[in-house]
Image (cartoon, rainbow, N blue to C red):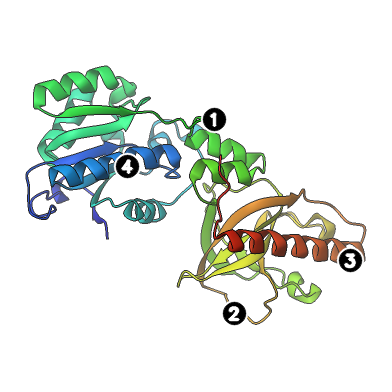
Amino acid sequence: MVRVWRALDDVSIAGEASPPAPGSVVTIGNFDGVHRGHQAVVRGVVARARELGVPAVVTTFDPHPMTVIHPDSAPLQLTSVQRRLDLLAELGVDAALVLPFTRELSLWEPREFVERVLVDALHAREVHVGENFRYGHRAAGNLSTLHREGGNHGFAVHAVPLSGDTATWSSTYVRQCLAEGDTTAAAAALGRPHRVEGPVVEGDKRGRELGYPTANLALADDVAIPADGVYAGWLIRADRTRMPAAISIGTNPTFGGTVRRVEAYVLDRDDLELYGEHVGVEFADRLRETITFEGVEPLLTQMATDVQRAREITAYRALRRDTTPQP
């Protein structure tokens, strides 16, 4: 369980380690997506913290800084803050400082950020960051300034590459993959399938009439949703039950729809009552683009094919006990 601090005044390093030891090993970033590059940084922090007998701490921000600095350019989010914290917990993080990103915080100069966050609050002994790390007002701080501040305040700085053998892992890259419908490449960079989450709400109930009842998710406007199309994947319930699914993203053009939706049909299940339940939908492979059919019969024929392909893909992944394509 990750201990979460949502303000500098909430931070309490004493007692976080077992046995208690002064200081912490810290990493800083948005960590949107917690992709393979983020995971490499965090694993290094956790390993080093265990060696020193101090807590491993992640410092992140809510909301994304761009929503405050340049709201018109704010990126779509790959993970909610809670999902981010859950993923960090799986990596062994002891505590997370979720700083409310405000206009005031955006004006902190690099030195002020270091002194208030890393020195006074977290008593950092080591700081691990990605090799492209920037911080402070107008992103004036970089690895050079952080090394200098570390020398002044007694903490070491470690820069971690964010690249794999064949690609650079970044949240921007993952968003690009999703925008192109390439959920396979997105999963390879994330180290797991991309997930969207939300409550199940009532739709047109047309899927039930066609024999394929779907869970229609209500999603926030800032969520990164893959390109329109049909996908194989899974629906995940609150109790973490994972069920193979065929997923449709789009406006249902065959029926003249105008509202973009994410709908998941749990394979071979017509007995589920999911209205009001908060669920996740994860994407494996894209099966096809959205198509406007000339009538219901050709649509049903294609849906049967889609469902069979989704069944084969998810069964194969289950057989391998693997849901994530490798880079």
Residue underneath mark 4: 42
The residue mark sitting in front, 4 or 1, is 1
Spatial separation of the CA atoms under disc 3 and disc 1: 44 Å
Q: Position of residue 323 (x, y in %)?
A: 56, 55
Is residue 279 at least partly visible in the picture?
Answer: yes
Spatial separation of the CA atoms under disc 3 and disc 4: 50 Å
- Residue beneath the point at 85% across and 66% down: 300
- Residue beneath the point at 7% across and 47% down: 21
The residue mark sitting in front, 3 or 1, is 1
Say what amino acid the circle numbered 4 marks: Val
Which numbered disc, 3 or 1, marks the residue that appears first in the sequence?
1
Which numbered disc, 2 or 3, marks the residue that appears first in the sequence?
2
Query: In the figure, 43 relative to 107: above or below?
Result: below
Query: In the figure, 42 relative to 91: above or below?
Result: above
Query: In the figure, 135 relative to 53: above or below?
Result: above
Say what amino acid the circle numbered 2 marks: Glu
Residue underneath mark 3: 296
Residue underneath mark 1: 166
The residue mark sitting in front, 3 or 4, is 4
Say what amino acid the circle numbered 1 marks: Thr
Identify the image quadrant of residue 153.
Answer: top left
Residue underneath mark 2: 273
SS at circle 2: loop
